[in-house]
Amino acid sequence: MSELDHRGRPRVVVTGIGVKTPAGCDLDEFWSTLLSGRSRAATITRYDPSPLPVRIGCEVRDFDPSPYLGPKEARRVDRVTQLGLAAAVDALAAAGDPGADPARCAVVVGTGIGGLITLEDQVGVYLDRGASRVSPFLVPMMMANATAGMLAMHFGWTGPNLCLATACAASANAIGEAARIIREGSADVVMTGGAESSMTPTAISAFARMGALSTRNDEPELASRPFDAARDGFVMGEGAACLLLERLDRARARGATLHAEVTGYGRNADAYHITAPSPGGSGAAACMQLALEDAGIGPEAIGHVNAHGTSTPLNDAAEAEALHKVFGDSPPPVTSTKGVTGHLVGAAGAAEAAASILALRHGLVPPTANHEEQGDDIGLDVVHGEPRAIAPAPVLSNSFGFGGHNATLVLTPVD
């Protein structure tokens, strides 16, 4: 088969995957948890959440950064970077040495907020102890591009190094832009994905004040319920996921495992409202169409959709409308893994791309947790209850962010 796509561009494949998520910190646990359909939401344990209006979240439990960072270095990077670096190291280890010129190796990482834990902690230090006690590492720990910079330094890669901060679309944008970098010839190998750890008291309070979060404090395991009639908001999560992308010809030549191909990428803007989706999901629908056109396929070729599906009333309804605009009266099966993981914000798109690739590998679509009675405003074939077997076919993965940022990926089995 050709090593160029339908537009004559180098084909781009995924050769390594690493995850650090509430559903698990390795691929086997991540996948088995998604297939179980059991939510990982619980009362927040990292600090006392009792004064907060929302006290639940999806934390990455039992994560130990020490295998990836020495004790001194770990203290000098925010948790978001610890998670991102660990996921990237796992992805590269799984892929094997790509054997590329470091100047032809790039990093493109997304995050919605960056080192918010450090920023919030150090504001407290300033208020309690004064300016002279603020950490000199505050700036490099809190800056959004810290994870991208750390990955390049850790791997010694001197090619393009970018950080995308497009809210909840950030890591899907990162993967799409990484594929474009390879297609345009600026790099042969790209570590890409996203990381987020912003479950701080201030952030939880702010999202709660917006009315964006579920308030099921007494039933956290039932709180995240995408496309369900009783959905009342999302559950904040944290985590990281990274993919190693390579040019197909190089990956084949070195005998790498080819997990999937990035065949399509769409991105656009709603240009409508800073938090609400455009009416009728028009921006999301246009984004999906762009991704299909980039992949050179029609809607009928898609086997299933990994939806953005946050569990908020407005966004789930808008995405459902968008899917009907693109696919007509009978969209393909739809799932949202946020029922299990919560919303990983800037890391969501990458974690869901990983889930989509695993669905292709195993021929199974994970069920949407807590989907008991479909909302009247949805009208989709939402996979729930049990995993669903599917035939090999491209999957469409959606990510939409505050600010009106839309990103859609098409991931395809490699022929």
Image (tube, rainbow, N blue to C red):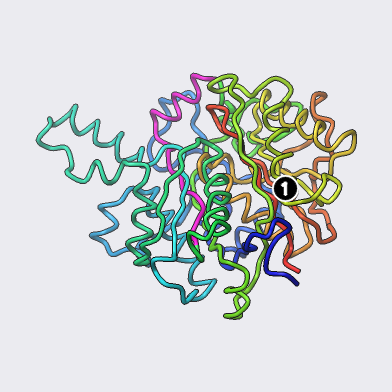
- Residue sitting at 28 percent across and 36 percent down? 121
Q: Quadrant of residue 293?
A: top right
- Residue sitting at 46 percent across and 61 percent down? 88
- Quadrant of image for the N terminus: bottom right
Q: Which residues are magenta?
A: 190-210
Q: Which residue is disc 1 drawn over?
A: 396
State the residue lying farthest toward the front.
8
Q: Percent position (x, y) of residue 181?
A: 52, 55
- Residue sitting at 50 percent across and 36 percent down? 166
Q: Nearer the viewer, residue 314 or 22?
A: 314
Q: The residue tagged with tag 1: helix, strand or loop? A: strand
- Residue sitting at 34 percent across and 64 percent down? 154
- Quadrant of image for the C terminus: bottom right
Q: Nearer the viewer, residue 384 or 157?
A: 157
Q: Would residue 33 appear left or right of 243 to someone viewing this image?
A: right
Q: Nearer the viewer, residue 236 or 401?
A: 401
Is 7 a magenta residue? no
Q: Would residue 172 appear left or right of 112 to someone viewing this image?
A: right
Q: Amino acid at mark 1?
A: Leu
